[in-house]
Image: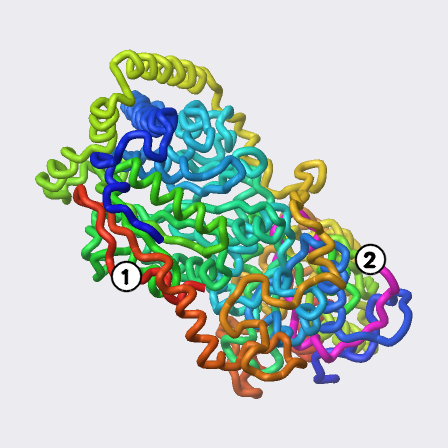
Amino acid sequence: MKTDPNKDHLGKDPAGKDLTRQQYLDLYYYMRLNRAVEDTMVKLFRQNKIVGGLYSSLGQEAISVGTAYALEKKDWLAPMIRNIGALLVKGVPPRDIFTQHMAKYTSPTLGKDGTSHFGDLDNLHIVSPISMLGDLIPVMTGVAMAGRYLGQKIVAMTWIGDGGSSTGVFHEGLNFAAVQKAPFVLILENNQWAYSTPVKRQVPIENLADRAKAYGIASYIVDGNDVVAVYRTAKEAVDRARAGDGPILIEAKTMRMRGHAQHDPAEYVPKDMFEHWKQRDPIEQYEKFLLEKKLLNAATKKELEQKMEALLNKDRDFAEASPMPPPELAEKGVYCTGDDCHKIAAQWERDKSEVMPPKSNIAAVWKVAAFGTGKGSGGKNAPIHFGDTAAAEEQKDNAAELSPKAPAKVVRNGAAKTTKVPAGKARR
Amino acid sequence: MPESRTSAANGAVNGAQGHGEPVTFLEAIKQAIFEEMERDPAVVLLGEDVGVYGGAFKTSEGLLERFGWERVIDTPISESAIIGAACGMSYLGLRPIAEMQFIDFIACCFNQLTNFVAKGHYLWNAPAPIVVRGPSGGGVHGGPFHSANPEMYFVHTPGLKVVYPSTPYDAKGLLKAAIRDNNPVLFFEHKFLYRRIKEVLPAGDYTVPLGKAIVRREGKHLTIVSYAAMMHTALEAAEALAKEGIEAEVIDLRTLLPLDEETILESVKKTNRCLVVHEDTKTGGIAGEIAAILCEKAFGYLDGPLMRVTALDTPVPYAPPLEEHFLPNAKKIFAAAKELARY
């Protein structure tokens, strides 16, 4: 893979090289919208109009927006609670986010759950998160596997934090995705704090992307406050996953600029740490870049802000005017009652007969050295044995084919570097 | 007094009209999976050693050769990944069957099942048509980690369905119904029954509806409610009771969640006495729930206390004398029923 050290940092990027002006402006709009939606909710929270907790993604907008922007419409995502920006990019209107937080009957879950805990299987292809972090990793692996099986050529994406990366299901899910070579991209948002516990007290390694090595998958490290670098990295990862390279882990380094939630003043965070990161605000940095590169001017900016304000006012008014759910709703919907409730049908984009006898294929569908081929066993009559050791020659070929493709790309501190880490080695 | 755990080991209990050779419980499960995969390409199977090896109990033997790698998926030893992936697949319209090599291991994916899978439809309108199946139960000296009856953890989880059949006919029909159901269904297969019980199955496709109990033996003096392997033990006790002039009605629950209250209530309103027998441990077992339902809905009909014969409140011990002491048997059921009949 070619890496151009100048390509990845926005300050050095020749404007328009591989993003259109509209794409640059989209990234800006969605980051602004992400922050504005949350600012609106802070006001609602202070007015006691938000029923439960409110979790801020202040300072992390570039990650939500830049990664989700790399997906196509047909792709699937599953956010974490702070990925409001990803939801906006995927097409969720702000009113859904307001009504969710305010527990309104008009919300996607009709008031049964709050925050970003909602999804849309049919249109937007969003899987709802739950509070037990890491669970979405195997779920999205399954989404990716099903998409491949049905011939849909989709990519599945989800997010995890530095904290959530220590769960058992993180390991189970990523390992399974890796061995399945699932078209799956995992964004690890290292915001340096799991509630009050700093990352150094959670994990004894410097780069969480190093965990990818354990699963034999490719990984990237990116400056999570640089939306263009995040987008480019995510785009490359999504393209590779779609092309059959298997799952990819991206560590985006950033800083959580608020407490765990509204109730938490985050007094455990050193003040100078906040100061340091405040200078690196993703939106301010990006706006400066856009103005310098003349991708944005005062008039465009004002127009965009007016558009945003009108949308937010409309959606906030809608949410405030919406009713709470009727109490009896609590009793409903535990079970799907059948076809009258949900007509479940897979969308086949390949010929079904390929997976039905007698066409079902017992040859491996993706290449894993010495797996499923019977090679090395010397027995033509044993087409599906995998216990045999691959011939030395074959292993060598395999290593040569796979190792140099995916160096871990490090984009941070204003300069891009390429490490020696052959993250693609052993990638299967 | 007979000591063996099943009297029905060599014959059909449901009297279904069949054809051909009698098949084992294991074979019935295998047929259900095979026929559903043959019928619908959305049905896939995943689990530990289900592919090349054909499953620890050979319930998926030959499926890989017929349906291929994409549909018969060997997984790492990662129960949470198995359930998570099955759920994710179901969101795209597939109907995955996830195998737990032993149902004891379902505890490893408890969170995935109870917090994610079970709540999806209620919270965000996302049905998850998956089946989680695996060998359960004791009596085969499998020891404390290969003999469990963990059904009640899940009966306490709204959003799941819990099925626990007792005959090959039901195993096949209920498994097919579970695969076609739009909800997550946990399907418990009592491994004591796997090879000990045979039945002639009907030709062609059939299902047994979820959530419906069945009266296995009619009687007028008391009702014995049971399920899975213990249903056979209860029938055995009922035969012994009949020789003493006590006619027990035996109900096989078949599905524990949703529970068929109607069949239980109807029977108890007739017999006025109820004994619940289960291999699960006593505290928090389904007997307690049935007792509460009878108190709420049939209190005036009861001539005596609800009684229960269950396993002890301990882990499943390994040594045969210990396990035999731990488990209910026909003798214990017989004694309890005699006592209840005196009311």
Q: Residue at x 65, y 53 (%)?
A: B95
Q: Residue at x 51, y 61 (%)?
A: A180
- At horizontal 43% and vertical 46% (from top left) the residue drawn is A238
Residue range (magenta) = B178-206
Direction from residue B57 to residue B207 in the image, left or right: right
Q: Position of residue B203 (x, y in %)?
A: 88, 64
* Label 2 crowd (10 A; few <14 / some 14-19 / many >=20): some
Q: Amino acid at mark 2?
A: Tyr
Residue A38, position in %: x, y? 31, 27
Question: Percent position (x, y) of residue B59?
Answer: 68, 72
Viewer can see residue B160? yes
* Magenta span includes A334: no
Instruction: Determine the secondary structure under disc 2.
Output: loop
As drawn, A395 above or below A101: below
For residue A246, above or below residue B12: above
Determine which quarter of the picture holds residue A202: bottom left
How far apart marks 1 and 2 lie (CA) works out to: 57 Å
Viewer-side label of 1, 2? 1
Alpha-carbon neighbours of circle 1 within 10 Å: few (<14), some, or many (≥20)?
Answer: some
Secondary structure, mark 1, is strand
Residue A70: percent from left, percent from top:
41, 39
Dot label at residue B206: 2
Q: Determine whether label 1 and label 2 are within 8 Å by CB.
A: no
Which residue carries the number 1 mark? A421
Amino acid identity at mark 1? Val
